[in-house]
Image (tube, helix red, strand yellow):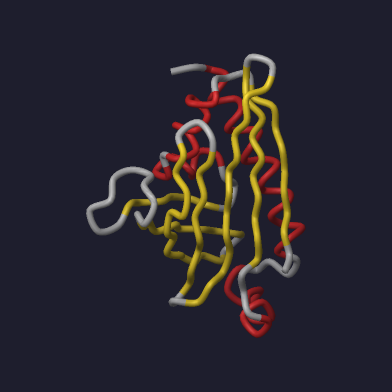
Amino acid sequence: MKQVAVEQSVAADPMVVYGLISDVTRMGEWSPETKSCRWLKGASSAEVGARFRGSNQHGWHRWSTTCTVTAAEPGKLFAFNVDLLNLPVAAWEYEITPEDGGSRVTERWTDRRATWVEKLSPLGTGVTDRAERNRSTMTETLSRLRLAAEAGP
């Protein structure tokens, strides 16, 4: 099972950081690949079991996924599973820990794709090395998140 983790120190309270991360409607502001997210079926905030749709783009490739919140612990942890056409794709986790008056954010991606899905994925996403692509986009995501959190409300 492939996994990538990236960390970033943020000079902001863990609750502020959690508020930004768990508001999935803002994910397009941080992520270079996720363009937008919207809550589904009456959900409006991060609660375990809530679902949202993510719209993604890499070059001319576009795709949407359905995500289900698996952890929502304010100030500590936000996580969700990603599925495409009812097939498991990934698990994402944002762990927030207090650090010297601010926070340390660890973003983790775990590949949940079956081998045959992994082999077909480049056709839909244009990404041949998903782990390396995610390492790059996760680093950028956390940098953008840090700037927003440190800028304040």
**Res. 50 image quadrant:** bottom left
Which quadrant: the C terminus? Answer: top left
User: In percent of the image, x 62 and y 41: which residue is there?
Assistant: 141
In the image, taking residue 13 as reference, residue 40 lies left or right, namely left
87 above or below 79? Answer: below
127 above or below 101? Answer: below
User: In percent of the image, x 30 and y 57: which residue is there?
Assistant: 40
**How many numbered marks are there?**
0
Q: Residue 33 versus residue 46: which sits nearer the camera? A: 46
| Residue 102 x, y percent position in the rendering | 62, 19
Q: Residue 101 versus residue 10: which sits nearer the camera? A: 101
Q: Residue 30 versus residue 94: which sits nearer the camera? A: 94
User: In percent of the image, x 63 and y 14: which residue is there?
Assistant: 101
Which quadrant: the N terminus? Answer: bottom right
| Residue 61 x, y percent position in the rendering | 56, 66
| Residue 71 x, y percent position in the rendering | 47, 49
**Res. 72 image quadrant:** top left
| Residue 125 x, y percent position in the rendering | 60, 68
In the image, taking residue 19 as reference, residue 76 lies left or right, namely right
Residue at the limit of the structure toward the top, as seen here = 101
Residue at the limit of the structure toward the left, as seen here = 42
In the image, taking residue 81 as reference, residue 7 lies left or right, namely right
Residue at the limit of the structure toward the bottom, as seen here = 116
Q: Residue 82 versus residue 139: which sits nearer the camera? A: 82
